[in-house]
Amino acid sequence: MAKLGIGIIGSGGIARGAHMPGYKSCEDLGVKIVACADAVPETARLAAEQFEVPHVFTDYRKLLEMDEIDAVSVCTPNYLHMQPTIDALEAGKHVLVEKPMAMNAKEGKKMVDAANRTGKKLQVGFMTRFQSPAQALKRFISAGEMGDVYFARAQAMRRRGIPGWGVFTQKDKQGGGPLIDIGVHILDLTLWLMGHPKPILCSGQTYAKFGPREGVLGLMGQWDPKIFSVEDFAAAFVRFENGATLVLESSFVANQEARDVFNTDIFGTEGGCSYNPCKMFFEKHKTLIDATPAFLPQVKAHEAEVRAFVKAILDDTPVTVTGEEALMTSQIIDAIYRSSETGKEVTVK
């Protein structure tokens, strides 16, 4: 008998490509995927066949009725994150929900409240934290090697990377464009490295200069510009209660050098660092030092994320990426969109 029975809500690409392989890699811990659910019967059936899952549903609520299931992954589109998460928590299941945790902070707060009310664990799928460079930089920052961290520059920039599949270009289903899709990853990583100072003010601007246009090259499939309703570029400046500040840039499309950028730079009084490529910068004995970590272990970040969730349940320890931390990213993203709409600096609520 499995020590931990798992249910998968939403059986599409992120479930089959990340979550389900992650749970399969935890079979040594007594983990078994018991059931998967998807509103599209064929999607659920294919996932079940691929991962030898015995039970298949088109209604996730039937999955939640199973006593054999102890925890679920919510792998649905963004607009379907909140309700399955709350329903699962109230059914007595622990939850790992994909990023972003919800369409906005209001929904995210309801999810956090449900986790606190039920006493069940809620982890959010920010897998970038589990990669070796991120872990190495966090160890140095936590040890005080960077001193007082006062500024960060975070970028998640694609040159021609509007997804040509799914609902990534539809605001009513996704909540936004690159800011909420890839920008949220680098924002979470940066906040984590900074120690999650409290954000207080934000000034932001979003643009849709390419998505609504015909004839723009699509390197990730060709989207339909007639239904493009999100931003394709966002920039923001965030102030924190401790005096630190953050600049954030995120794009699906930008006329930049022919490479995608996914990086954060951290600036402190005793040192600085970059995530990608992973480097650290110090002044030692009147000498400027650029330090490059060597022999960092190869880590499958999604598997590490799932294993951390599983271990937190089995050992009854706190999850690695909490709902409260994920809620902070949603609050900042909400403020960026609100600032862009009003043309003013706004309070981060």
Image (spheres, grey):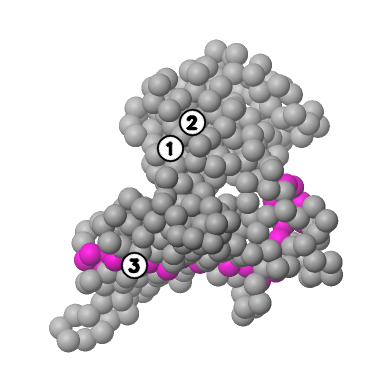
Task: Please identify, in this view, whether the residue under mark 3 or under mark 1 is nearer the observer.
Answer: 3
Cα distance in 3D space between marks 1 and 2? 8 Å
Disc 2 is placed on an element classified as helix
Q: Position of residue 147 (x, y in %)?
A: 21, 66
Q: Is residue 126 visible?
A: no
Q: Is residue 85 above or below residue 228?
A: above
Q: Is residue 317 above or below residue 99?
A: above
Q: Look at the image and say whether residue 195 sits in the magenta stretch.
A: no
Q: Position of residue 185 (x, y in %)?
A: 51, 54
Q: Earlier in the sequence, mark 3 or mark 1?
A: 3
Would you name the residue on which mark 3 appears? 151
The disc labelled 2 sits on which kind of residue?
Met
Q: Earlier in the sequence, mark 3 or mark 2?
A: 2
* Residue at the (60%, 13%) spot, across then down: 65
117 horizontally vs 60: left or right = left
Q: Position of residue 267 (x, y in %)?
A: 32, 70
Residue range highlighted in magenta: 145-169
Would you name the residue on which mark 1 appears? 323
Looking at this view, is 21 or 280 the one in front? Answer: 280
- Which image quarter is the C terminus in? top left
Contact (CB < 8 A) between labels 1 and 2? yes
All told, the count of numbered labels is 3
Q: Look at the image and say whether residue 160 sits in the magenta stretch.
A: yes
Disc 3 is placed on an element classified as strand
* Residue at the (62%, 41%) spot, across then down: 78
User: What numbered label is drawn on residue 111?
Assistant: 2
